[in-house]
Image (spheres, rainbow, N blue to C red):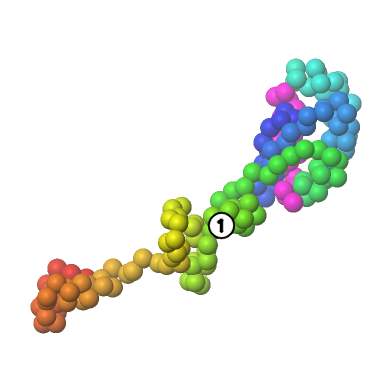
Amino acid sequence: ALANAYRARDGRWLSLVVVREERLWAGFCAAMDLPQVEGDPRFVTRAARAAHVPELMAILDAQFATRDLAEWRVRLAAAGITFGTLPGLRDLPDDPQLAANGTFVATGDPDVPRTIANPLSLAGAPQVTPRRAPALGAHTDEILHELGHADADIAALRCSGAVA
């Protein structure tokens, strides 16, 4: 139960890793605002906690659901409890490690300001700024002209519905 993932009130997740249970148990219970659990005979020792994992997990599940992840981060860090946050998709564009790796790049498009960078890079080849795909039919005239079609032919193709 002390090495498990828990969901906070705001739907975000954290991964709890209490490695020195005996030393940190009282501080953990205080940080969790669970003083009644600290002295509960089912949880008073590491062996007792191991024998009652489902019960402790149920208590911790319910308690983690009472506060947002930001508050749990402050409370657990202040008590010296080891934990990590489990990012969701909405967190990825602002993740510092992904930013340092250049995973997300600016697009120049206000509707989609960032996107995933091209995973391929070639020495000496410049990176191209990502952009939206062209709209359906955006290059039809240009391509048909390159193929030798006259404006009248293109107009007829459009009228027939053969091209967009």
Q: Is residue 91 visible?
A: no
Residue 69 painted magenta: yes
Residue at 86%, 25% (x, y): give it: 22
Front position in the image: 120 or 3:
120
Give above or below for 29 relative to 127.
Answer: above
Q: Name the element at disc 1.
A: loop
Q: Hey, which quadrant is residue 133 in on the image?
A: bottom left
Tell me where residue 9 appears, x and y as whole percent. 69, 47
Tell me where residue 103 appears, x and y as whole percent. 54, 55
Tell me where residue 136 appears, x and y as whole percent. 28, 68
Q: Hey, which quadrant is residue 102 in on the image?
A: bottom right
Residue at 14%, 72% (x, y): give it: 147
Q: Callout 1: few (<14), some (14-19), or many (20+) C-alpha neighbours within 10 Å?
A: few
Residue 89 painted magenta: no
- 87 to the left or right of 78: left
Give above or below for 20 relative to 134.
Answer: above
- 138 to the left or right of 48: left
Quadrant of the frame with the N terminus: top right
User: Please, what is the dominant secondary structure of the magenta stretch?
Assistant: helix
Q: Hey, which quadrant is residue 151 in on the image?
A: bottom left
Tell me where residue 89 appears, x and y as whole percent. 56, 51
The amino acid on which the numbered mark 1 sits, given as a three-letter code, is Gly
Front position in the image: 80 or 65:
80
Query: For the magenta stretch, what is the residue range?
Result: 53-70
Front position in the image: 145 or 125:
125
Q: Is residue 155 visible?
A: yes
Task: Identify residue for label 1.
Answer: 102
